[in-house]
Image (spheres, grey):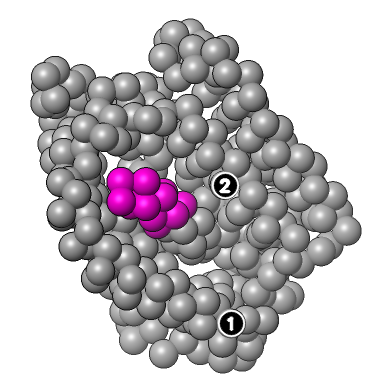
């Protein structure tokens, strides 16, 4: 049961990062749209799926609460302030998404709210990942770092990096879902975003070496871990080639491969720790009876239904958006 819920948690987090990542990226790129027509195309490209994508964030949090309560409590103690800021940004982004269609005089304000909410949510998520990689101040299983213990230059750097990655995913989604002005903008931005992401990875790697982070020792102990970064590098090459050939769907899947490779690198580097390098999977797991009880409800029904719902939505709304249609 512990292995089952660990895999399900990893799957839920990865799906959230990829699915909500690209619509947060579209939200950030929304600020660069040349006119109202391009902005409407961008919104239409994510309107059928953006709220469903966030379901995976709730699902992941529910698994943490039920199956790994020690990790849930520790992360909430350490990251309470950034998580509240992220939730506020996601809520404001959603409100702005809906209100801009009905508003006339305040539409510029809602546009700023949509792009700004997307930026803040992505940035905070990156900061949280950076804080985990750098290591939280934990003693005797309890967080002792204070409300701003997560805040560091390395965490801020990771916040910027995740925003760039989300924009890369979002641009890839726009080349597939849109045409004309929005698609042209995405093709134009993709090479710059790819170079920016690669530059971030180099800077983050050098910073991690300079800080002598424990995760770097894992890489030296197990050189096979470099397989995942090599997969990500290959995806970067394919993405660059696809942009030159104006292939519409390949850039998005290359972005997904880059994120999946980065996620696998971190997951394997940290295992068996869930909070690196303080709390292991075995330490954090609920009693076997609780895990089994969750399996008969969330494992057998909620997870399959959520997966099926996600697949059906993406199948029904596949293809290009109608440039003349409006979101309702």
Q: Give whichever of discs 2 and 1 has the lower sequence position.
A: 2
Residue 49's place in the image compared with 62, above or below, is below
* Residue at x 69%, y 52% (from the top left corner): 254
Can you see residue 221? yes
* Residue at x 31%, y 56% (from the top left corner): 60
8 inside magenta stretch: yes
Which dot marks residue 219? none
Q: Which segment is the magenta one? A: 1-14
| Quadrant hosting residue 156 | top left
Q: Determine the secondary structure under disc 1.
A: helix
90 or 13: nearer the viewer? 13
Residue 216's place in the image compared with 182, above or below, is above
Percent across and percent down for residue 218 are: 49, 17
Q: Residues within 10 Å of mark 1 (few under 14, many from 20)?
A: few
* Residue at x 57%, y 47% (from the top left corner): 260
Q: Quadrant of the C terminus?
A: bottom left
Can you see residue 13? no
Tag 2 residue: 260
Magenta stretch prevailing secondary structure:
helix
Q: Residue furthest right?
A: 245
Q: Is residue 159 left or right of residue 166?
A: left
Measured Cα–Cα span from mark 2 to mark 1: 21 Å
Tag 1 residue: 315
| Quadrant hosting residue 145 | top left
254 or 174: nearer the viewer? 254
227 or 196: nearer the viewer? 227
Q: Determine the secondary structure under disc 2.
A: helix
* Residue at x 50%, y 82% (from the top left corner): 313
């Amino acid at each position: 049961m512990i292995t089952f819920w660990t895999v399900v948690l990893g799957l839920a987090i990865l799906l959230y990062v990829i699915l909500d990542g690209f619509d947060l990226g579209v939200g950030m790129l929304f600020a660069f749209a040349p006119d109202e027509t391009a902005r409407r195309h961008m919104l239409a490209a994510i309107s059928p799926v953006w709220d469903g994508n966030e379901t995976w964030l709730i699902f992941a949090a529910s698994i943490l609460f039920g199956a790994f309560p020690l990790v849930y409590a520790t992360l909430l103690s350490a990251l309470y302030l950034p998580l509240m800021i992220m939730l506020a940004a996601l809520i404001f982004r959603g409100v702005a998404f809906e209100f801009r269609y009905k508003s006339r005089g305040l539409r510029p304000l809602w546009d700023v709210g949509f792009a700004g909410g997307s930026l803040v949510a992505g940035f905070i998520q990156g900061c949280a990942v950076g804080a985990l990689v750098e290591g939280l101040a934990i003693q005797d299983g309890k967080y002792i770092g204070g409300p701003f213990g997560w805040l560091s230059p390395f965490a801020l750097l990771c916040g910027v990096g995740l925003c760039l990655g989300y924009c890369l995913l979002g641009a890839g989604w726009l080349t597939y879902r849109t045409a004309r002005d929005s698609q042209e903008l995405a093709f134009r931005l993709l090479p710059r975003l790819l170079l920016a992401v690669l530059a971030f990875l180099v800077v983050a790697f050098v910073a991690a070496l300079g800080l002598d982070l424990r995760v770097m020792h894992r890489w030296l102990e197990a050189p096979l871990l470099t397989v995942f970064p090599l997969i990500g590098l290959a995806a970067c090459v394919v993405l660059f080639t696809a942009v030159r050939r104006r292939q519409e769907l390949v850039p998005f899947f290359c972005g997904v491969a880059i994120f999946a490779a980065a996620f696998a690198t971190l997951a394997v580097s940290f295992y068996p720790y869930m909070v690196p390098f303080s709390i292991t999977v075995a330490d954090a797991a609920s009693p076997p009876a609780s895990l089994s009880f969750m399996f008969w409800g969330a494992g057998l029904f909620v997870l399959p239904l959520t997966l099926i719902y996600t697949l059906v939505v993406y199948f029904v709304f596949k293809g290009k958006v109608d440039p003349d249609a409006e979101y309702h």
